[in-house]
Image (cartoon, rainbow, N blue to C red):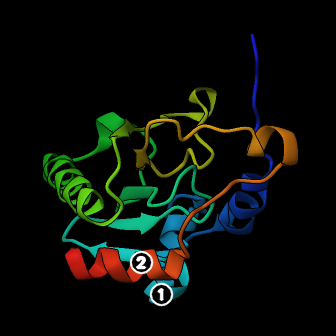
Amino acid sequence: MKRMWSPWRSGYIETFTNRPTKKKGKESLFSAALRSNDDDRHFIVWRGKHSFVIMNLYPYNSGHLMIVPYRQVSRFEDLRTEECDEIMKTAQRAIKALKKIVRPDGFNFGANIGRASGAGIDQHIHFHIVPRWNGDTNFMPVLTDTKVISEDMKKTLKKLRKVF
């Protein structure tokens, strides 16, 4: 079995995890980004009533988005009905926007729930939408520790906000 690891993500995760909060012990990087009210700096695309869309700062592909509930919960079963409803509707909206902007051939959509599943930020559930193109896997990350992102993230952010 071949394994590929992404050590470049740990710097981002360590920057925002394990911060004290008033309620449940540790504030997630998502909660910290929301609290900062600096959507441009944190690449927050859109804010809904129960959830928001944020770009992944260490994306697997251009346009890699995450949908995150405002409430910091780690367990899928702890999401309220209204949060689940908005997350799913937002996923539809995000996929439509990405189809218009980056024109992928397909998508990965889902969540890593819990540390054992590969969740890098396991204390705040979030859902990934990763645009995929036929032939988008290549040798760069493996051989040169480099991920190729084809468009400046700020440019993608502006396009996404316009469509959202």
What amino acid is at disc 2? Leu
Other residues around mark 2 within 10 Å, as few (<14) / some (14–19) / many (≥20): some
Mark 2 vs mark 1, foreground winner is: 2
55 sits to left or right of 129? right
Image x and y of residue 77, in percent: 30, 34
In this picture, is 54 found above or below 145? below
In this picture, is 99 found above or below 153? above
**Quadrant in which residue 76 is drawn:** top left
Quarter occupied by the N terminus: top right
Query: In percent of the image, x 32 and y 67: which residue is there?
Result: 52
19 sits to left or right of 163? right
- Label 1: state its secondary structure: helix
Q: Which residue is mark 1?
A: 40
Pick the residue in front: 70 or 149: 149
Q: Alpha-carbon distance for marks 2 and 1?
A: 8 Å
**Quadrant in which residue 18 is drawn:** bottom right
Q: Which residue is mark 2?
A: 157
